[in-house]
Amino acid sequence: MQHAFFPPVTTSSKKGGDSRERLLICFSHLRWDFVLQRPQHLMSRFAAEGNVLFWEEPQMLVEATEARLDIRRCARTGVTVATPILPAGLDQIEERRTLKRLLDAALVGHDGPVLRWYYTPMMLSFSEHIPAECVIYDCMDELANFKNAPPELIPLETRLLEEADVVFTGGYSLYEAKRERHPNIHPLPSSVDVAHFRAARAPGIDPEDQAALPHPRLGFYGVVDERMDLDLLARVADARPHWSIMIIGPAVKISEADLPRRPNLHYLGRKDYAALPDYLRGWDVALMPFAINEATRFISPTKTPEYLAAGCPVVSTAICDVVRHYGDVEAVKIADTPDAFISGCEQALALAREPGSWRAAVEARLSHISWDRTYQRMRDLIEEVVTRPRHAVVALDDGGTATAAAA
């Protein structure tokens, strides 16, 4: 039987041994309750085996008179979520000092090993003093290319790459861009919970806010930001006014006023992850109308396998990792112009009306990917770091002296 990822660690320097539990601290720029994606899928699996503290970006509140740390436990997963609440107006130095103090206070009483896991280099500056058995950088996006990226992100990432014991990337393009910068880096694209999305293929409800919309229906879900080609969306809606186009998800870093408005464009807002199969059940085709720009240069959209698992043919712009991994799949149409995108939608609608061999090909492709596989691979690579002979674990003996022993 495979041993647990969070086994008690015995310090033999104490009489009779001292069992101490590991703690994984995940520093994330994405909030736990925002949208369910890579961090939530992975941290939920790690939490099934042990203690996970998910550290969110701070909330700056004008009404806050002093800093505090709001801590809650996710009942569904067991992940402990920590949200720093800071008074608005702190300068960068004071903010970093305050976050360091809150982090140190949160770890009071924990005397076991720590794993530090980063989704953003920006959190390194207040956390790198915490001793760690393993430092993990899970680089799911090229954040420096995103809108409003802070200038200090690039030098902090350089520092994180120097300190990290293992690096994961959210796609192959991102891996290719960074593979010369770290000796232990691995491409692990985001995956899919096939069983969850396969529910869209079975009979079920059609949500009230889309039930009255006519077919054919084409839809997108996800964050609506600078990565979406809003002009393309408008052109598709104008070219085919009889198509109902659903957009599900919050608008971030762009104004609601910037969203194109058409009678057949329907913005349904943010939906829970659990509800997505119900919406997909009523779609004929799923869309990925991404802009081709710096923000999308290295993305590897999770939506592709999720849409396919739900039984929807997919139409995407020419995102590099989509072309690389799904360009040979009949159910995925790749388009590099607005006219080609509209044509791809028409071809996808024709596929949706036919069972065809495309469904078997999709099943074969999906059989090789899952979040469980991705998690297991990450887990194994971290254990290789933690258990390698030269890896030292610092412990205190009875006299309080720090000693190092090979793990």
Image: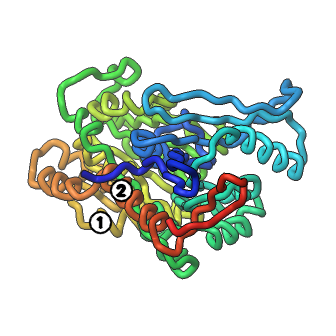
Q: Residues within 10 Å of mark 2 (few under 14, many from 20)?
A: some
The image shows residue 322, relative to residue 27, as above or below, that is below
Horizontally, residue 365 falls left or right of residue 169, namely left
Tell me the SS state at disc 1: loop
Q: Position of residue 159 (x, y in %)?
A: 69, 69
Q: Nearer the viewer, residue 334 or 310?
A: 310
Residue 287 can be seen in this image: yes
Horizontally, residue 21 falls left or right of residue 344, namely right
Give the residue pinned by disc 2: 374
Q: Nearer the viewer, residue 197 or 115?
A: 115
The image shows residue 321, relative to residue 242, as above or below, that is below
Q: Quadrant of residue 209?
A: top left
The image shows residue 83, relative to residue 382, as above or below, that is above
- Residue extending farthest to the bottom is 180
Residue type beneath disc 2:
Thr
Residue 229 can be seen in this image: no
Q: Position of residue 231 (x, y in %)?
A: 54, 51
Q: Residue at x 35, y 66 (%)?
A: 323
Q: Residue at x 24, y 45 (%)?
A: 349
- Residue extending farthest to the left is 356
Horizontally, residue 74 falls left or right of residue 281, namely right
Q: Residue at x 68, y 42 (%)?
A: 107
Q: Residue at x 59, y 44 (%)?
A: 30
Q: Nearer the viewer, residue 268 or 20?
A: 20
Tell me the SS state at disc 2: helix
Horizontally, residue 160 falls left or right of residue 350, namely right
Residue type beneath disc 1:
Gly
Instruction: Say if mark 1 contacts mark 2, CB within 8 Å.
Output: no
Q: CA distance from mark 1 to mark 2?
A: 22 Å
Q: Position of residue 222 (x, y in %)?
A: 47, 42
Give the residue pinned by disc 1: 327
The image shows residue 231, relative to residue 197, as above or below, that is below
